[in-house]
Image (cartoon, rainbow, N blue to C red):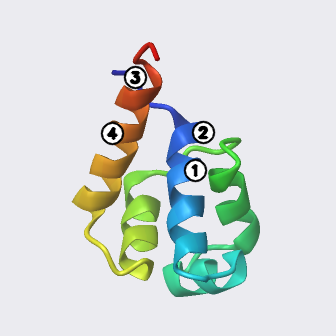
Amino acid sequence: MLYNSRITGQVIGLLRTNRGMSQEALSGLAGIARSHLAMIENGSKSANVETLWRIAQALDMPLSSLIRMVEEKIAGTGKKQ
């Protein structure tokens, strides 16, 4: 399984919107710039572990849960339907 920054961003964006949060709110809670979060969500920038940790904490979830969701989505995109 290869890392996919686009899928990572999709998962973060989905979690954020499911919680009714704006990019402004999540980026503020995570301590990162809103533009940085936007680039992560659209897949144009890869987040490092510290940034993913901050985002997970701001979403009130463990980093391991965020990583697991990304892994499941990546694994699901490789399956034939």
Instruction: Give me the C-alpha separation between circle 3 and circle 4.
Output: 12 Å
Callout in the foreground (4, 1): 4
Position above or below: 49 against 43: below
Contact between marks 4 and 2 (CB within 8 A): the answer is: no
* Label 4: few (<14), some (14–19) or many (≥20) C-alpha neighbours in 10 Å: few
Q: Any mark on residue 2, and which? A: 3
Q: Where is residue 81 shown, x and y percent of the image?
A: 46, 17
Q: Nearer the viewer, mark 3 or mark 4?
A: 4
| Cα–Cα span, label 2 and label 1 | 5 Å
Task: Give the mark, 4 or 1, whose residue is nearer the N terminus.
Answer: 1
Q: Could you tell me how far apart the alpha carbons at marks 3 and 1 are, in whole angstroms?
A: 15 Å
Q: Residue at x 42, y 60 (%)?
A: 52
Residue placed farthest to the top in the image? 80
Q: Any mark on residue 72, and which?
A: 4
Q: Report which residue position mark 1 lands on.
A: 9
- Nearest the eye: 74 or 35: 74
Task: Indicate which disc, 3 or 4, sits on the residue closer to the N terminus.
Answer: 3
| Amino acid type assigned to the residue bearing label 3 in the image | Leu
Amino acid tagged 4:
Glu
Q: Are marks 3 and 1 in contact (CB under 8 Å)?
A: no
Q: Are marks 3 and 4 in contact (CB under 8 Å)?
A: no
**How would you rate the neighbour count of disc 3 (Cα within 10 Å): few for under 14, some for 14-19, many for 20 or more?**
few
Q: Are marks 2 and 1 in contact (CB under 8 Å)?
A: yes
Badge 2 element: helix
How far apart are the alpha carbons under marks 4 and 2? 14 Å
* Secondary element at image label 4: helix
- For label 3, the SS is loop
Q: For residue 6, which numbered disc appears in the image?
A: 2
Q: CA distance from mark 2 to mark 3?
A: 12 Å
Amino acid type of the residue tagged 2 in the rendering: Arg
Q: Quadrant of residue 45?
A: top right
User: Seen in the image, is 25 located left or right of residue 81?
Assistant: right
